[in-house]
Image (cartoon, rainbow, N blue to C red):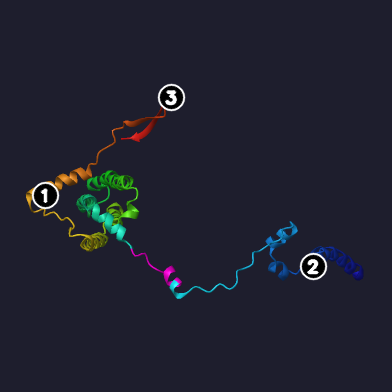
Amino acid sequence: MRSALGVLALALLLPGLSACGGGDSKSLAEKMAGDPEAEALAKAGYKPNPKPRPEGLPPPTDAEFKAWDRKDPEGEKHLYKFDKANLTKMLNYWKELDCFREKMKSEGDKVLGAEPGTPLEEQWIVFKQIFIPMVNTWQQRLLATEPRILEKSKLIGHFLEAHELVMNGWPDAYNNNDKVAIATADAHWTIVENKIIKYLKNISQEELPKDDLTDPKVKEKHDKFCAAALNPPKNTGKAKIKYVGKGSGGAKKLNMGDD
């Protein structure tokens, strides 16, 4: 009886063993070492015809290596040229950012220590809902007006760093009533200012504008400038229409977007 069971078990195993062998005598290591792509190309009848490598060519000289590793003699000079030629306009952008900073800190200081659900907190929430999108639109308008300014100007990097503080740094600090975070944002702004001051000394004799707000006339002018920055022109809602084409189909009217 036992011998009969052994024969039956062996009979059941043999088909499996033959299936594993299955006419494919390659070992697992051989299969893993193979190149399926090359085998497929060979089966398709593809025959590589590589070009012979050139011989007798000398290796690169030290002078050639040095030429490959050379630095652009212009470097960032093209950025300096743009900023210097457009300095009045660029510093005007900075003055607008400074107005945003003043407004953000002024409103944020009012809410320091305010209890949740109080009118002060509600006022802060409403302010952010209006102010932050406006500051974001300022950046979008700047980049739309100056579509290549990111590659033309070195100042723009400092401006965007300051813009992020107004958009996120101070709002987050005031939201958490975190005086340390507020002081950190203040210090960060000072660092950005110092970067700009140092850069201006390298490209011009112009100084970073700092209004003396103790002078009534200067303060009046400053407040007027900031009022304009904080209340940018709104879209009229009237689309610009441009007529193009004089073919048989007649002129086509294109909507050029809101003014």
Look at 70% across and 66% down and name the residue there: 34
* Residue lying farthest to the left in this orientation: 216
Query: Residue 46 at what x, y percent from top left?
Result: 72, 58
Residue 219, placed above or below residue 190:
above
Look at 45% across and 71% down and name the residue there: 64
Residue contact at pointers 3 and 1, CB within 8 angstroms: no
| Kind of element beneath mark 1 | helix
Of residue 54 and residue 201, the one placed in the foreground of this image is: 54
Q: Is residue 253 left or right of residue 80?
A: right
**Whether residue 114 can be seen here:** no
Sequence-wise, the earlier of marks 2 and 3 is 2
User: Over which residues does the magenta segment extend?
Assistant: 64-73
- The residue under label 3 is 250
Closer mark to the observer between disc 2 and disc 3: 3
Query: How many labels sit on residues?
Result: 3
Q: Residues within 10 Å of mark 3 (few under 14, many from 20)?
A: few
Query: Residue 194 at what x, y percent from top left?
Result: 22, 63
- The residue under label 2 is 25
Question: What amino acid is at disc 2?
Answer: Ser
Sequence-wise, the earlier of marks 3 and 1 is 1
Of residue 184 and residue 140, the one placed in the foreground of this image is: 140
- The residue under label 1 is 219
Question: What amino acid is at disc 1?
Answer: Lys
Look at 37% across and 67% down and name the residue there: 71
* Residue lying farthest to the bottom in this orientation: 62
Sequence-wise, the earlier of marks 2 and 1 is 2
Q: Residues within 10 Å of mark 2 (few under 14, many from 20)?
A: few
Q: Residues within 10 Å of mark 1 (few under 14, many from 20)?
A: some
